[in-house]
Amino acid sequence: MHCNVLEYLEEAERAYPKKLAFGDGAMEASYSAFAQMARQIGSRLAALGAYREPIAILMEKDVPSLAAFFGTAYSGCFYVPIDKTFPLGRIRTILSVVEPRFLILGKKDAALKEGLSIEATVLYLEDLLSPAPLDTGLLRQIRERHLDTDPLYMMFTSGSTGVPKGVLVSHKSVIDMAEQFTKTFHFSQEDVFANQAPFDFDVSVKDIYLTIKNGASMQIVPKNMFVLPKSLASYLNEKKATTLIWAASALGIVSTLDAFKEEAPRYLNKIMFSGEVLPIKTLHYWQERLGDAMYVNLYGPTEITCNCTYYIVGRAFGLGETLPIGKPFPNTEILLLDSQGQLAKPGESGEICVRGSCLALGYYKNKEATQKAFCQNPLHDDYHDLIYRTGDMGYQNEYGELVFTSRKDFQIKRMGHRIELFEIEAAVNAVDGVEKCCCIYDQEKEKIVLYYQAQRNLEADILKSLQANLPKYMFPNLFYRMERLPENSHGKIDRPRLKLEYMEQRQ
């Protein structure tokens, strides 16, 4: 039984010492070299007295930053990845929540520390990686004291008060994720993961830990390939990538820009996506070019360690339909609860709530928010039995598959009708020429506002399509075309920003 993710790394190091573990284009590290880098960093952090505390890492998306994550784990601490390209205000806000004693960054980013206004001791990654004798005795003592419930990392999500919330995840939860994914999708040492997601986004957690769990390899896809993706297929073929675990928006970029027009990936056999609802026309684009691959729709918030359900696409879907989110992973239970905290009736919508080892430890230094989201199972009070309330709504379809319908706050009541804004978005996304869309609701004016991304005005086409698919009370009242919808740092449509811009424009 594993109780520390470092056991995966060390097992792979023993089995495949010279095999590529991680590559970023500029640097490639074998399992032996990478593990040595991580132990070097861990030994130095431990010598400074760091233990069971957050280590903030102002990171690049590269191999040394990955080594810093694992080095932090060797020291018995937990890492907090922060994208160095974030606005300084955002970084300062995150650090104000974390209050770290130590902040790791690269020497070329030394000027950033002046704008952060924090008391943390700054450690340069280059210094941590410089050769020095390992304190193997100290590392052994740290390992002997380790518990699988100790935290491994903290990642931040948006907070309703405007202050981001730090989601704290344990070794146990990551191990559970890696075990269930490997069994369900049959990963092995033959796999090559092509990493797309930023390291402060939990989609990347699957790439990183499935790689070391299976003695596989991971290649970091350069960011510019999602801006000018004509060379993407060549890159994936050169690296012999077998697996993509990407945000749905990244798959959409590929289809919108027709990145596989001249060349298609030849080695891909597993394509997994999450983060947002994937439009069916995007799925069709990929299926037409990689028909033999397995396509998997993954669902789950950061608070349940990446994903709690999956759906392997096994039948044809028409434009305007929505992919199910499927069924729970083993060792995970999904409860659909109604507004009274009871199980929703068959076919009825309920809030998606999750039980199992996948649950995070809660929100760092935020007891109130933790107790609200991570709460006692309302179906009984016989013993301590935590569930996580996702705030997402779903129901079981005629196939027994779970279907995501909306966020609780995306369900509106208009003209006496309950309306799921995502249902409107699914219908609009089916219109030829619409790349993506987003609906917001102006409750005061009782207006549904549609923002859509397209290269030309498609209002007439959208209305024509809606007339054939939706009742009139679900039609948007206002249409705004944008050449590019705003996105947050994780590639999702920035709905709060659109809502704010709309309200400012309305006044």
Image (tube, rainbow, N blue to C red):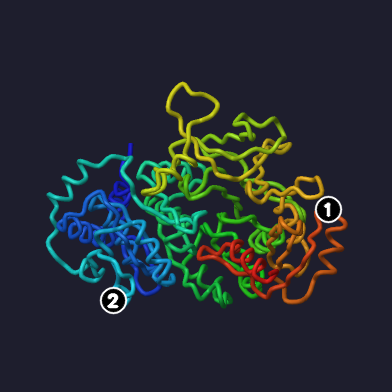
Q: Which SS class for mark 2?
A: loop
Name the residue carrying label 1.
473
Kindly indicate whether the residue at mark 1 contacts the one at mark 2 (C-beta within 8 angstroms).
no
Q: Position of residue 218 (x, y in %)?
A: 42, 61
> In the image, what residue occupies the spot 68% across and 65% down?
436
Residue 191 seen: no
Q: Nearer the viewer, residue 330 or 98?
A: 98
Q: Position of residue 482 (x, y in %)?
A: 69, 73
Dividing the picture into quadrants, the one containing residue 487 is: bottom right
Task: Mark yes or no: residue 174 visible.
Answer: yes
Q: Who is closer to the viewer here, 2 or 59?
A: 59
* Residue 203 left/right relative to 3: right
Asked whether, in this view, residue 367 is left or right of residue 119, the answer is right
> Which residue is at 40% across, 59% downward?
217
Q: Amino acid at mark 2?
A: Ala
Q: Position of residue 435 (x, y in %)?
A: 69, 67
Distance of label 2 from label 1 (alpha carbons): 56 Å
Give how far across and how far down residue 129 sits, in percent.
22, 67
Determine the residue located farthest toward the top in the rendered image: 382
Label 1: element kind: helix
Query: Residue 507 bears which disc, if any?
Result: none
Q: Residue at x 43, y 70 (%)?
A: 86
Q: Earlier in the sequence, mark 2 or mark 1?
A: 2
Question: Which of 158 and 20 lies nearest the eye of the viewer?
Answer: 158
The residue to which callout 2 is attached is 110
Give the crowd class for mark 2: few <14, some 14-19, many >=20 residues within 10 Å. few
